[in-house]
Image: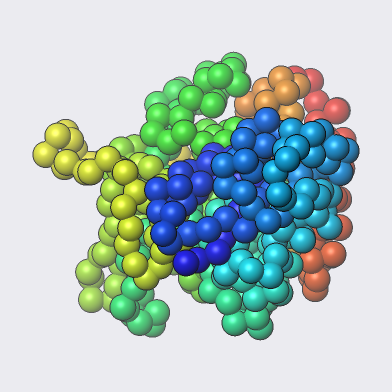
Amino acid sequence: MKNIAILGSTGSIGVSTLDIVSSHPDRFRIIALTAGKNLDLFATQIKKFTPRIAAVASPDDIPRLRELCHGVDVIITGGVEGLVAAATADESDMVVAAIVGAAGLVPTAAAIRAGKDIALANKEILVTAGHLFMELVAAAGVRLFPVDSEHSAIFQSMEGHRSEDIQRIILTASGGPFLNTPADSLGAVTVADALNHPNWAMGKKISIDSATMMNKGLEVIEAHWLFNTPVDKIQVNIHPQSIIHSMVEYIDGSVIAQLGSPDMKAPIAYALAYPERITTGVKPLDLTTMSGLTFHNPDCEKFPCLQLAYRAMTDGESMPAVMNAANEIAVAEFLAGTCSFTRIAEIIERTMDAHVPHPLGSIEEVLDADRWGRETAREICREMVY
Ligand code: NAD
Ligand code: MG
């Protein structure tokens, strides 16, 4: 029996993780859950999975959650200390990091320090503080399993191989909903258009990141830290069918890929049950019904966010954290209807232009850089006309 805590259980990854847990009650038990705002769904999950501890992001929501969970034997807590208590609960073996954004930094760092293995969906953690997290993981002697489908594919394609034999990583990208939209129409796209991802059903923030292709930029940085691979050996290929989830090329010219229907339950299950494979209900792949698998280079002029991520890595130090913060603000502004789609990249670029990178020696310093990036991006956004 593996005891699991989920940070962000009401999100897209959290719900898929609970689906897998409920189909394998003999393997997994839920010890702790955390959530942000969706208290009704959270209460339903608490009643069904009866964790020992449940934490809600805002302490103001604790009374309401206690009311909703009246009669259930669970410790209900909240705020950052509550999230940390859930992330470090004694009995858990593995923590699924599925909070969105830099908000996941503190509880996930606490989980690692407490010796928990991590199933990592929350890529912003590695983008903002990759060097610190990889150091924490090594110092604590825990394992970090990628949940992101591309990184799970890379991880699987590296199993049994020597890292020195790797030539390059080929990260696939669907291209998002605007792959075939003319560049001069992007300024007028709506939030609904941007959320309408062709292949994956995901949370709102990552759906917008996929539409701008910032998601792929974040994933290049994530792959750099997870697989200790220089960024110039990580190449992005647009593969609109999302069947090959990524590939690893070796020095002998062999390319190893992982394929499957686009469903996050597969990479989540691999992270939860590693090294075993368990059933997921993911639709079997029938390649004979597919008209073709295609690949091409990304259009970096039309999608400048991908280039911004490479630039952030070249600048290094605090720049990726600032870029990530500016992206979180710009995406929130777009979702709120206060800036246009093409402004997202502009806000990020102008925030980065205003930043002088400096070394980050602790999570607290990462949070300072994150705050600076958010404030600067908000100011830039206020000065802009829609
Ligand atoms: P989501 O928005 O659906 O869910 C996010 C979860 O985090 C929710 O439970 C929410 O309540 C919680 N949360 C949000 N803000 C919080 C805060 N400030 N403090 C505490 N909790 C907070 O997001 P998602 O799509 O499930 O994505 C989660 C993470 O996984 C992201 O980092 C995303 O990039 C990554 N990821 C998601 C997918 C996917 O298919 N959804 C695929 C790969 C990677
Ligand atoms: Mg991905």
Q: Residue furthest left?
A: 288
| Nearest to the observer: residue 208 or residue 270 | 270
Quadrant position of residue 46: top right
Above or below, 229 against 291 in this view is: below
Residue 14: x and y in percent read 56, 45
Above or below, 133 against 289 in this view is: below
Residue 263: x and y in percent read 38, 42
Residue 374: x and y in percent read 82, 44
The residue that appears at 86% across and 44% down in the rendered structure is 59
Can residue 123 be seen from the camera position used here? no
On the rendered structure, is 105 left or right of 158? Answer: right
On the rendered structure, is 35 left or right of 119? Answer: right
On the rendered structure, is 147 left or right of 353? Answer: left
The residue that appears at 80% across and 73% down in the rendered structure is 361
The residue that appears at 80% across and 54% down in the rendered structure is 82
Task: Name the colour scheme.
Answer: rainbow
